[in-house]
Image (cartoon, grey):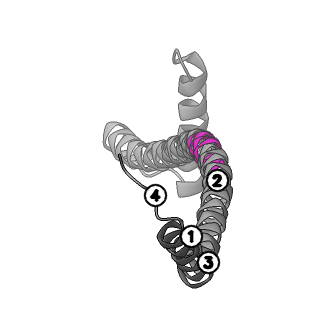
């Protein structure tokens, strides 16, 4: 059978234990420390990522809120502009009607003045023609003032009788 060499076994166990202590001190400690630092770094990165995500969500919510406010403000300004436009249109229409009425009133006034001027000229011409006709018929000359007064009275009576005068 096999015999166990206790000295060799104890030397091998001692060598194994010394190697384990050396490996533990040289490699396992720094490796564990590196793993812990890396784990903490990853946790920190995850926390920062979560914080960044919440900040981005808050910014996005703020962005949408401001966008909604801007849209509402734009709609309000459009409504106000339309109202101002309608008001300006109404004011322009009122002013145009007033201007048209003023022009029409002035035209009617001008027509009335022109009609009166034409009637005076017509009366004057009628007076002259009537005087000339009376002189020829009578063959004599009446006093100018008397003739004129008689014709003016005749024309005034004629206007009173005339319909629409």
Above or below, comparing residue 122 to residue 28 in the picture: above
Q: Which residue is disc 1 drawn over?
A: 10
Image: magenta residue range: 69-82
Q: Secondary structure at mark 3?
A: helix
Q: Residue at x 58, y 79 (%)?
A: 18
Residue count near mark 2 (Cα–Cα under 10 Å), binned few <14, some 14–19, many ≥20: few
Q: Nearer the viewer, mark 4 or mark 2?
A: 4
Residue 77 located within the stretch drawn in magenta: yes
Residue 109 picture location, percent across and down:
56, 45
Frontmost residue, 8 versus 90: 8
Frontmost residue, 102 versus 77: 77
Q: Residue at x 38, y 48 (%)?
A: 125
Q: Are marks 4 and 3 in contact (CB under 8 Å)?
A: no
Marks 1 and 4 sit apart, C-alpha to C-alpha, by 11 Å
Frontmost residue, 10 versus 97: 10
Q: Are marks 3 and 2 in contact (CB under 8 Å)?
A: no
Specify the label residue 159 is tagged with: none
Residue count near mark 1 (Cα–Cα under 10 Å), binned few <14, some 14–19, many ≥20: few
Q: Which residue is disc 2 drawn over?
A: 50
Which one is earlier in the sequence, the residue at label 3 or at label 2?
A: 3
Q: Which residue is disc 4 drawn over?
A: 4
Q: Nearer the viewer, mark 3 or mark 2?
A: 3
Q: Is residue 29 left or right of residue 100?
A: right
Q: Which residue is disc 3 drawn over?
A: 21
Q: Residue at x 53, y 56 (%)?
A: 144
Marks 4 and 3 sit apart, C-alpha to C-alpha, by 26 Å
């Amino acid at each position: 059978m096999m015999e166990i060499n206790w000295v060799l076994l104890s030397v091998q166990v001692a060598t194994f234990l010394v190697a384990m202590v050396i490996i533990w001190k040289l490699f396992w400690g720094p490796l564990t420390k590196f793993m812990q630092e890396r784990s903490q770094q990853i946790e920190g990165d995850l926390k920062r990522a979560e914080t960044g995500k919440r900040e981005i969500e808050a910014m996005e919510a703020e962005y949408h809120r401001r966008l909604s406010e801007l849209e509402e403000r734009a709609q309000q300004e459009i409504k106000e502009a339309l109202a101002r436009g309608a008001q300006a249109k109404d004011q322009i229409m009122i002013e145009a009607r007033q201007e048209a009425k003023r022009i029409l009133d002035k035209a009617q006034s001008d027509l009335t003045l022109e009609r009166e001027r034409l009637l005076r000229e017509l009366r004057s011409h009628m007076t002259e023609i009537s005087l000339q006709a009376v002189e020829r018929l009578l063959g004599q000359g009446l006093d100018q003032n008397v003739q004129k007064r008689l014709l003016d009275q005749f024309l005034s009576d004629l206007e009173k009788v005339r319909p629409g005068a």
